[in-house]
Amino acid sequence: MDSDLTQKSISFNSARFLISASRLDECLPDHGAEVAFAGRSNAGKSSALNAITANGKLARTSKTPGRTRLINFFSLNRENARLVDLPGYGYAKVSRDMKDDWQQHLGHYLNDRRCLRGLVLVMDIRHPLTEFDQMMVEWCEHNQLPLMILATKADKLKFGQAKTSMLEIAKKLKDYQCVEHLIMFSSTAKRGVDDCRQALANWLDAPEN
Ligand SMILES: Nc1nc2c(ncn2[C@@H]2O[C@H](COP(=O)(O)OP(=O)(O)O)[C@@H](O)[C@H]2O)c(=O)[nH]1
Ligand SMILES: [Mg+2]
């Protein structure tokens, strides 16, 4: 197929909210290409999505952690290319049962979604590689899914400190094949946004396997 010759280049500014799903069977048909964003609650995932799409209102951001419990789908300028906001991990204010339930849905999406091209793991540069983050890295490695790490809220550190944190993260992840991009990021300072867009476009442009 020559479809890649006729496809328009991906732009993120035209992202629009499509639907929310609380279960895998409520998700959109498993066609095309998706990149999903994961991270601990409050890591800065929604803010990162807003920065990437230059739309301050796309994904809701919150000072109260854990508000986003649904899988949210966003369309881009090309049919069947989507960004996906996964439920944040580690919401303290829900019951154990609800937590299990919701992690299970996340697990279903990650394990069964064939159009998933890559995972973006958003972590606070001041608290990198939490237990959950480690789990996601292991999962990507095991499933040979390309991983991009955004070490966000870099504006909260002096540049030297941020650089040191990046080196520490890189050292801890050096043996993982899945880690394709490790980006110092700040949604407020718009740092790393272009690098992230470039990497996302490459993933979404990759031919279907
Ligand atoms: N200074 C700074 N604050 C941020 C940044 N990203 C997110 N925040 C703040 O961190 C809090 C959580 O952000 P949010 O995007 O809702 O996190 P989510 O739970 O991972 O979606 C909010 O108060 C944001 O304003 C950033 O890059 N810099
Ligand atoms: Mg959020």
Image (spheres, rainbow, N blue to C red):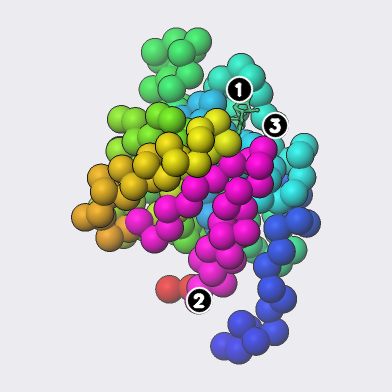
**Could you say which disc has been placed on residue 207 in the image?**
2
Ligand 2: does it lie within 8 Å of the C-beta at label 2? no
Q: Which residue is mark 1?
A: 67
Q: Could you tell me which residue is drawn at 76 percent across and 39 percent down?
A: 56
> Does the segment drawn in magenta span residue 180?
yes
Graded by Cα atoms within 10 Å as few (under 14), some (14 to 19) or many (20 or more), the crowding at tag 2 reads few
In screen coordinates, is 140 left or right of 15? left
* Residue type at tag 1: Arg
Q: CA distance from mark 1 to mark 3?
A: 9 Å
Most foreground residue, 30 or 65: 65
Q: Is mark 1 within 8 Å of ligand 2?
A: yes
Task: Write the residue at 51% across / 35% down.
Answer: 158
Residue 209: image x %, image y %? Answer: 43, 73
Name the image quarter holding residue 14.
bottom right
The answer, for residue 32, to whether it is visible in the render is no
Cα–Cα gap, marks 3 and 2: 31 Å
Chain-order first, disc 1 or disc 3: 3
Q: Quadrant of residue 144?
A: bottom left
Q: Nearer the viewer, mark 3 or mark 2?
A: 3
Q: Is residue 56 visible?
A: yes
Q: Position of residue 184 (x, y in %)?
A: 49, 47
User: Is 46 one of the magenta-colored residues?
Assistant: no
Residue bearing the label numbered 3: 60
Tell whether label 3 touches label 1 (CB within 8 Å): yes
The mark found on residue 139 in the picture is: none
Q: Residue 156's x, y, as percent?
A: 55, 31
Among numbered discs 3 and 2, the one appearing first in the sequence: 3
